[in-house]
Amino acid sequence: MEDGMSHLQQRAACVSNISDVMRQMTWQSQKQLLRTLSRPDIGLTMPQMITLFAIRDAQMCRMSELADMTQQSAGTLTGIVDRLIEDHLVGRVRDVEDRRVVQVTLTPLGQERVARVERVHHEEMQRMLQHVELGQLHDLDTMLRLLLDGLQQMCGDDSHAVTSCSPMLTPIQPV
C-alpha cells in the first residue's frame, strides 16, 4: 500500500484525478473547437457542425431522422438546416420512392467544409501530440478507447463499442 492508503482508496484517488483531467480536457477541447469553427474559412456554429457531420454520416436523411441523430428539436433543426441551405452547404432532395418526402444531403461545398473541419482538427491534434513518443501514443490510444467503451456502456450505447481494430465513430473522422 502506498502512503498507508488501501487499494480502494488509491483507486478512488486515481479515479478522482482522471475525472478532473477529463473535465479539463472537455472544457479545453470545446474552447478549441469553437475557435476552429469560428475561423473565417470554416464559419460554423457547433449545432451547424453537428448537423453537417450527421448528414454526412447518413448521406441522405429525413429531417425527423436528423433530429434523432443530432438530439435537436425539429423546430431548432429546421432553422439550422435552412441556414445551411442558404450557405449552399446542404440541399433538399425529393425521396425517389415517395415524392412527398423531402430529405437533406450535403452539397459538394458542404462536403468540402466538413473535410476542411476534419483537416484542421487533424492538424491541431498533430501539433498537440507532437512531443509524445510513438509508444506513448499507442498506450494513450488504448487507454482512451477503454475509457470510451466504459462511457458508452454507462450510457447504454454499446452498439459502437471501440476496439483497437475498429474505427472510432465520432463527428470528426481521420483525414
Image (cartoon, helix red, strand yellow):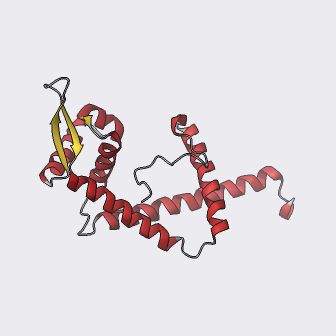
Observer able to see residue 45: no
Q: Return the x and y of residue 19 as percentages of the image width and height.
A: 60, 56
Observer able to see residue 37: yes
Q: Which residue is at 33% across, 39% downward? A: 58
Q: Quadrant of the image for the N terminus?
A: bottom right
Q: Quadrant of the image for the C terminus?
A: bottom left
Seen in the picture, residue 162 relative to 35 is either above or below; the reply is: above
Task: Please give left or right for residue 53 compared with residue 129 in the image.
Answer: left
Q: Which residue is at 34% across, 41% downward? A: 70
Q: Return the x and y of residue 165 as percentages of the image width and height.
A: 59, 47
Seen in the picture, residue 73 relative to 4 is either above or below; the reply is: above
Task: Please give left or right for residue 143 compared with residue 155 in the image.
Answer: right
Seen in the picture, residue 46 relative to 68 is either above or below; the reply is: below
Q: Quadrant of residue 35?
A: bottom left
Q: Return the x and y of residue 106 as percentages of the image width and height.
A: 24, 47
Q: Return the x and y of residue 23 as percentages of the image width and height.
A: 52, 58
Q: Which residue is at 66% across, 60% downward? A: 139
